[in-house]
Image (cartoon, rainbow, N blue to C red):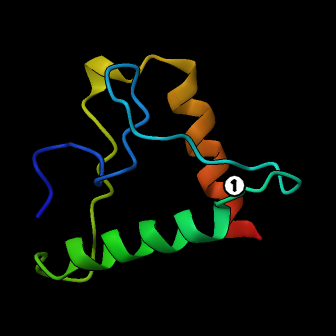
Amino acid sequence: MAALCAAPGGFCWDFKCDDAPMITDKSRMDYDVPIRVQQFLDSMNNQASFTKGKNLMLTMGSGQHTGDMAFVLSGVRMKRGFDT
């Protein structure tokens, strides 16, 4: 279950977190966008199993800690991962 507004495990890109960034450069050996997108979907499906109704709140961190540009860029990378 989601812990307040915390991001799913492994997806906290806040400046106070140390979760790994997504590697979006396809020429790198550690390119991981498809894997990370699937992990994110698995996490959301798990969260949905604790949720009543048809809507799911996507929690990605508390508002006072998400001012870091790396957080924004990682979110954009995640969205692009779904677009591929």
Q: Which residue is mark 1?
A: 30
Report the front residue among 39 and 68: 39
Q: Residue furthest right?
A: 27
Q: Is residue 9 above or below residue 19?
A: below
At 37% from the left edge and 76% from the top edge, which residue is drawn? 42
Measured as percent of width and height from the top left, residue 18 is found at 37, 31
At 44% from the left edge and 69% from the top edge, which residue is drawn? 39
Q: Looking at the picture, which amino acid does disc 1 mark?
A: Asp
Measured as percent of width and height from the top left, residue 79 is found at 63, 56
At 34% from the left edge and 44% from the top edge, which residue is drawn? 60
Measured as percent of width and height from the top left, residue 32 is found at 64, 60
Report the front residue among 76 and 43: 43
Q: Is residue 82 above or below residue 8?
A: below
Which of the 4 image quadrants contains residue 63?
top left
Q: Secondary structure at mark 1?
A: loop
Q: Is residue 45 above or below residue 58?
A: below
- Work out which quarter of the rendered image holds the C terminus and state it: bottom right
Q: Is residue 21 above or below residue 3?
A: above
Which of the 4 image quadrants contains residue 4?
top left
Residue 62 horizontal side relative to residue 2, left or right: right
Instruction: Report the label total.
Output: 1
Report the front residue among 58 and 20: 20
At 84% from the left edge and 57% from the top edge, which residue is drawn? 26
